[in-house]
Image (cartoon, rainbow, N blue to C red):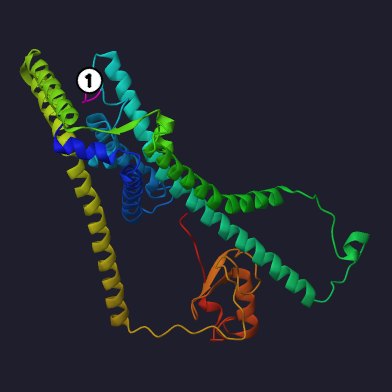
Amino acid sequence: MDNLGAVRVVARTPRNLAPILDAGATQTLRRLLHDTFASFFIKFLPDSPGGPKKYAHEVASLLHLYFTLVSLAKDGGTIGESLYWIARDNLVKPGQSQSGPDEDPEARRRFRRCVWAAAVHVAGPYLDARLAELRDMAEEELSVRRQVRAMEAEGSRQSPPRAMSGYTSPASVAGYEYSLPLSSDRIKELGLAAFVAIHPYAKLALGLRDVAARVAFSAGLSRASTLEHLLTGSRVRRLTGREAEGLRSDREARRSRALMEASSRGGGWPSWIKTKALRAKHLSEDWNKALLALVAVGCKGLEWWYSSGEEASKESRAEALDLPAPPRPSTERRLPKSSRLCPICRREKKDPAVLTASGFVFCYACVMSHVKDSGTCPVTDAPASEAHVRRLYFTS
């Protein structure tokens, strides 16, 4: 056995932690790739009503899916796995095509397994990112609801009882109204609270389960090293030098046969186009990792260039205009913690309007009434008039 093969055998022994580290590196790489692509598309996709920006994670997943599918079809493993010469047994078998589906039924079944494995591989970081966004939205919604209730309770303690006319129920006189114990709004709030509470523990449990699976796989107690391999029914192993060379030779032989068949069918433009398409396909497969690295670095480079240029443009505009410092809030007033609440009524803003004298946003009716009565900003006490009130209109 050659020295390289001996090193790989040693790395696969139960006493060695290399399989755990390799699996962890591949999981980190797939999350890093998704975050890189998603960040780029969030920055550059058009931000129009119903536009593509809200599908940035979906577009990033499709791009990630392409590179992963090419790697699985060519090397029998994902991009991170192939870097460590790790392959999946159900995708690497002698005599199978390494270039995609053809007339062989077994090759078509292998290609379907590659598609399923790529979809499961990409779904992990996509679902993680989407669930994190939903959790942030749920936390913000719960925070707003808690602040509204606190403001209402504080206002009810400070305000005098309202004069009542006509029939008044004994319940309202006693200070409470009858309501259903579980209204639809209450059920929604309980669901959001449960999701926020369960999400971090579920994520921790999946992470611990993955670590336990890697340890069991390294000790030879399990066939799957991660949850992803369990879902796809794949067993991973390191390829020896002879196996890798055999797969490469088999792939080159099949490519040569495919090019000969394409060039020998009738000739003319159709044959020329098919031959060039096959050569381009083979080239993209061979340079898949280099192309992926180029795309990822390009995305980050463009994002950095755009962000730095945007910051420089803002600074130059601010220096040219010599803008005065915005007025500070009065220390006597306590502002709501959430930007969704109006500083005057302490409820969610209805028909948001900005007071240009200070830059704060209120309910349109609240700020207009306050400015008419006092002629000042309710937060900073800066002089203000009705002409300073501007309604805000959002595109989405």
Identify residue for label 1.
Answer: 94
Please determine whether, in this image, residue 329 is positioned above or below residue 354: below
Decide which of 192, 50 is in the foreground and name it. Answer: 192
Q: Of all residues shown, which one is farthest toward the front?
A: 15
Please determine whether, in this image, residue 47 is positioned above or below residue 147: above
Say whether residue 225 is left or right of residue 392: left
Q: Magenta span has 148?
A: no
Residue 302 picture location, percent across and down: 24, 57
Main SS of residues in magenta: loop
The number of numbered discs placed on residues in the rendered structure image is 1
Decide which of 107, 354 is in the foreground and name it. Answer: 107
**Residue 167: in sight, yes or no?**
no
Residue 290 picture location, percent across and down: 17, 44
**Residue 155: in sight, yes or no?**
yes
Decide which of 48, 13 is in the foreground and name it. Answer: 13
The quadrant holding residue 349 is bottom right
Say whether residue 220 is left or right of residue 334: left
Say whether residue 259 is left or right of residue 331: left
The quadrant holding residue 103 is top left
| Range covered by the magenta-colored residues | 95-100
Please determine whether, in this image, residue 151 is positioned above or below residue 254: below
Residue 148 picture location, percent across and down: 67, 65
Q: Secondary structure at mark 1?
A: loop
- For the point 30% across and 19% down, the residue is 108
The quadrant holding residue 117 is top left
Residue 68 picture location, percent across and down: 29, 37
- For the point 29% across and 16% down, the residue is 106
Quadrant for the N terminus, please. Answer: top left
- Label 1: few (<14), some (14–19) or many (≥20) C-alpha neighbours in 10 Å: few
Say which amino acid is labelled 1.
Pro
Q: Magenta span has 98?
A: yes
- For the point 85% across and 55% down, the residue is 178
